[in-house]
Image (tube, rainbow, N blue to C red):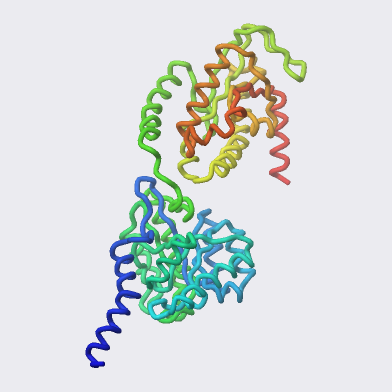
Amino acid sequence: MDTALFLKIVFLCVFIYSLAPTLLIRLGRVGAVARAARGYGRVALTFDDGPDPNYTPQILDILKQYQVKACFFVVGSKVRLYPDLTRQILQAGHTIGNHGFRHKAVWLLSPGATRGEINETNMAIEEITGQKTVFFRPAWGLFNAFLVWYCRLKGQKVILWTYMSWDWTKKATPESICRKVLGRLKDGAIIILHDSDSALGAAKGSPAQVVAALPRILDGIEEKGLRVSSLEDIIISKKKPFLRKLFQQLWLPVDKLARRLSGITDLPDSKIWRIALRRHRGREWAMHDSSVLKPGELYLELHVNNDRLMELIDENTSVERASIIAMREVLNGLPPLVEYLNSEKKLENVDIVMGITLLHRGLGRIGFTVADMKPGLFKAFTGWYERWLLGVFHPGGFKKLKTYREKLTPKYVIMTRQELTQKNKTNDKHNKI
């Protein structure tokens, strides 16, 4: 065979197997994510090439101080070498991604070797942490045709980066890293940094520059009005359907007007509570502790801040996670509620705080008494309205709510002033301990 022809065939094979997939993905962004959806004010922080016993713990400490979550794309052989450090990453609430087992460029790897780079790392992560990973980032961002097909077959989400920080070079300094990261920072950016210097081409000690730059980067992100979100939140979250988004936007001014007309105001120093002073119009109502709410007496009506709930759902792909945060804010809102009751002269005769909600189970667990509503038009309308509201703001929409429609029954949640004060004292005592 002619030498020139042979070289052309070799080049064509290499181009089809390695160069073409890399160019298609890196330039065309086909089959990989290099930027998240815009419009949410979020960025993702990722670290490659670890775990490293020297630098990874320092980075974890900084992330803990700033209370942000990142994704660590780990090398499988290092996962085996440092299992405790790998578990520490996960226990701190961060995500672990696959970065290959030996940090090899896959351009010239066979399909079998490519599969091994992915599978061995996935197995190491699962054996040591007990969790599977769905995120994969190839070493140096290089691809081959088999890798593209195999990632799709196995459901691996390929994650690249929005732009380079060049933090691994010899000339990198904390100032240059900050300048490169923050200078191009925009909503939806996926930031890449490194917590190890063991990869080919990385300057020795370069992660020390990252450790020095990281607090400034996190401060700069906040100054730009953005927030760091986990990779699950920023990648897996889906855009809201148009009609649901339209309903939400239309509901906001209507809700604001309704609150103003009905005298509902935000509770000072609380994100989650809204309140209104009401006069009891029904019959005499005996509470479980023998206190009685008589016709004409004042009580404090509690409302959950739906704007805050919407923020929590937007910030968290998991409704369960949003619910946990909401309940934490409910508990944190009890001391301001007690303070408000004791400081406002108009409330000195108010002995009952009460609300109506579908989300009564969580409130019941923290000390509120849950009571059924009497059947009738008011209960039916209240249930319909709150279910409609929950369906509009629930990530799964109305279809998701059908799975547990029978549980979505509005009920009263009640707490007396005495109970509220006692619970607040108990919480203060526990916090001091």
Please, is residue 288 above or below residue 123 in the view?
above
Q: Quadrant of residue 164?
A: bottom left
Residue 160 picture location, percent across and down: 39, 64
**139 vs 163: above or below:** below
Residue 145 lies, in percent from the top left, at: 37, 71
Residue at the spot x=64%, y=67% of the render?
A: 128
Query: Extreme right residue here?
Result: 290
Q: Position of residue 317 (x, y in %)?
A: 49, 46
Q: Position of residue 138 (x, y in %)?
A: 43, 70
Which of the pair 59/158 is nearer the observer?
158
Q: Which of the 4 image quarters holds residue 219?
A: bottom left
| Above or below, 240 relative to 247 | below
Q: Residue at x 31, y 59 (%)?
A: 184
Point 55% across, 63% down: residue: 60
* Residue 92 in view in this figure: yes
Image quadrant in which you'd find residue 408: top right
Name the quarter where the N terminus is drawn: bottom left
Q: Residue at x 47, y 66 (%)?
A: 47
Position of residue 60 in the picture relative to residue 369 (left or right)? left
